[in-house]
Image: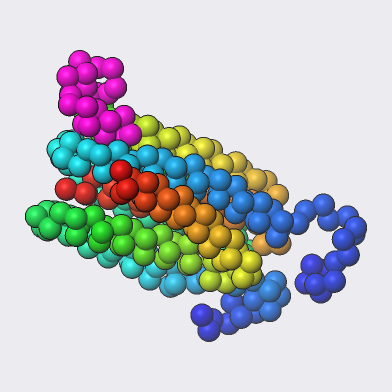
Amino acid sequence: MEHHSGLVLPNSGHNRDAEASKLGMWLFLFTEFLLFGGLFIVYMVYRMLNPEAFLTASYQLNVTLGAMNTVVLLVSSMTIAMSITAIQQGNSKRSIQLLVFTVAASLVFLVIKYFEWSAKIHHGLFPGMDVFNRLPHGEGLFFYLYFFMTGLHALHIIIGAIFIVVVIFRTKNGLLNADNYSHTENAGLYWHLVDMIWIYLFPLFYLIH
Amino acid sequence: MKNNTESHDESAHGTHITSNKEHYSTLAALLLLTVLTVSISVFGANLRSLTVATAMLIATVKVIVVAYYFMHLKFEKKIYTWLVLLVIVLFLSFLILTSIEYLNR
């Protein structure tokens, strides 16, 4: 019960520091933010140089599928936040259920993304394909950025889902509980970042008509 | 927020435990903003540059809501908010410098 007294000494055998762990995660998220931030600036500059081409190209994207994926990510962001509430209250079982739901949502996101990409590839719009090569310069740039940025984002979805699966197993084994849930918290922070990036990607590519 | 178990947990751990009710309201706000941004884009397509500005504004509001409530920034130590602001200032200065260069061509 020494956790509850708030008087744990630095060398009392507890080799973890939830606060440092969380701060470390935030610092990592800042580098991720700047990585995507740089790409957003590239997008902005190319868009200012080719406004008409970006507009024409953006009509090729499916707003319905993009909006569906936005909803999927927002709901999964809530479920992972709720799983942290559950584990804080000592309800590991409920926490696991909510994490499983979040992973399921990540799979739904990837399946929708797969259908979107397949449709584009079917139309020959992937960089290097015949239709892509005949596109006007600016429209080609749009699709380069579309595939690179949504691809990098999808990679983050996959990494985030793996992170959450690890947390599920660690919760199952009792390694994570009401007194030690910093991995759950960090997985949540990472997942929210992935959600935030999509919040900007969605209007920039799908909605700006 | 005034739930018994929560106030007990808060005093025990010194951390805020967000209630599911708060989570539901946060999600509802985010979904509402998504509906808003999609409808502005679909029905206001002739507004052009105005839609770009509003889309970015709504996205920014959504991101702030996610950070503030889902990422618990509201309940964290102030140092997290300051660090986030520092990174935003860094990013915005890069963005503005790039725009100035472009506008002065």
Colouring mode (rainbow / by chain / secondary structure / one colour): rainbow
Tell whether A29 sits left or right of A22.
left
Q: Residue furthest front?
A: B104
Tell me what residue is drawn at x 37 percent, y 55 percent.
A74
Q: Nearer the viewer, residue B82 or A26?
A: B82
Tell whether A110 sits left or right of A162.
left
Tell me what residue is drawn at x 22 percent, y 32 percent.
A138
**A72 up-or-down from A163: above or below:** below
Q: Is residue A44 visible?
A: no
Q: Nearer the viewer, residue A92 or A50?
A: A50
**Which segment did they paint magenta?**
A120-146
Please provide percent x and percent y for residue B9: 65, 74
Q: Nearer the viewer, residue A13 or A63?
A: A63
- Residue A113: image quadrant is top left
**Which secondary structure class fits the magenta region best?**
helix
Please provide percent x and percent y for residue A103: 46, 44
Number of numbered discs visible in the structure rendering: 0
Quarter of the rendering occupied by the N terminus of chain A: bottom right
- Residue A10: image quadrant is bottom right
Q: Is residue A205 found inside the magenta-colored segment of the image?
A: no
Q: Is residue A125 found inside the magenta-colored segment of the image?
A: yes
Please provide percent x and percent y for residue A86: 56, 63
Tell me what residue is drawn at x 64 percent, y 76 percent.
B10
Q: Is residue A56 visible?
A: yes
Please provide percent x and percent y for residue B17: 57, 70
Tell me what residue is drawn at x 29 percent, y 22 percent.
A127
**A193 up-or-down from B37: above or below:** above
**A137 up-or-down from B98: above or below:** above
